[in-house]
Amino acid sequence: MSTANAYLTVRGINIDVIYKDIKNLHIGVYPPLGRVRVAAPERLDDEQVRLAVIQRLPWIRRQQEQLRSTPRQTEREMVTGESHYVWGVRHRLKVVERPGRAHIETDGDRLVLFVPAGTTPDKRREYLDHWHREQLRHTIPDLIARWEEKLDVRVPKWTLRRMKTKWGSCNRETRHLWFNVELAKKHPDCLEYIVVHEMTHYFERNHGERFTKLMDSHLPDWRSRRDQLNEAPLADEKWEQQTND
Ligand SMILES: [Zn+2]
């Protein structure tokens, strides 16, 4: 996957632009969060791309809404044989029914869910969600501590939250950070990228040039981490539209 070579914000929507030796401009809106990528002919400049994006804004917004209202993956039955991601690695679920407290273990590429017989799919999903949160609760404090030291800042409070459109967020007044529970399914490098991204908002509110420069100095490979984070599982669909500029 190639890395974007321009980042535009058009009416609040972040756009990655890749200039290529192509004839037409392509706009794609990608799951899971509706990220927008533009492949543009090299003869166009950022301003021309911005105008093309503005023309397609109603279509882009429609695609994003559609993505965000569709369940990310087909609804899981939480039965043996399903794939579930843990820290970016695909695991095969194995459900073991047995009396006692429910718990989850990983065993190689297996994710083993021990539950009492008769546990409903909803309840099983809840156990997995709880377990994902636990993974994050164990991992995030060290990450934050490391970056507090590197950036010489304090994070007074952070919270896990299920979010539909964001991987993380930052309240600059209270310095409170939020992280999406879905991050437990992504590679740990992606989590670190989000931690650094949100902490970088302590220094700069907007995703402008200054923010990009700060990120470049904090975490030089942040672009590839971001691309990895936004890569959709192979099974997911992709929406794409070609426009003639
Ligand atoms: Zn941000």
Image (cartoon, grey):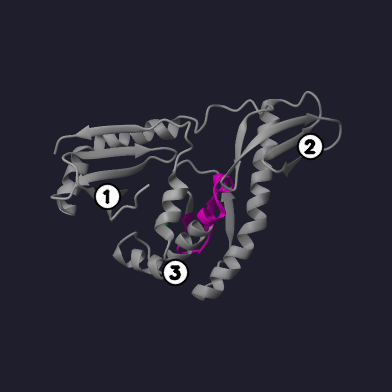
- Identify the residue under disc 3: 218
Q: CA distance from mark 2 to mark 1?
A: 46 Å
Residue sitting at x 48%, y 64%: 199
- Amino acid on which disc 1 is placed: Val
Q: CA distance from mark 1 to mark 3?
A: 22 Å
Q: Determine if the magenta segment contains residue 188.
A: yes
> Relative to 85, does residue 193 appear above or below in the rendering?
below
Q: Secondary structure at mark 1?
A: strand
- Amino acid on which disc 2 is placed: Ala
Residue sitting at x 69%, y 44%: 131
> Relative to 165, does residue 76 appear above or below in the rendering?
above
Q: Secondary structure at mark 3?
A: helix
Q: Secondary structure at mark 2?
A: loop
Does residue 167 appear to the left or right of 240 in the view shown? right
Image coords of residue 113 (percent x, y): 74, 35
Of marks 2 and 3, the one in the foreground: 3
Image coords of residue 103 (percent x, y): 77, 40
Which image quadrant is residue 26 in?
top left
Q: For the residue carrying disc 2, how many other residues have a C-alpha within 10 Å: few (<14), some (14-19), or many (20+)? A: some
Residue 17 image label: 1
- Amino acid on which disc 3 is placed: His
> What is the span of residues highlighted in magenta in the rendered image?
169-191
Disc on the earlier residue, 1 or 3: 1
Q: Who is closer to the viewer here, 109 or 239?
A: 109
Q: Determine if the magenta segment contains residue 40.
A: no
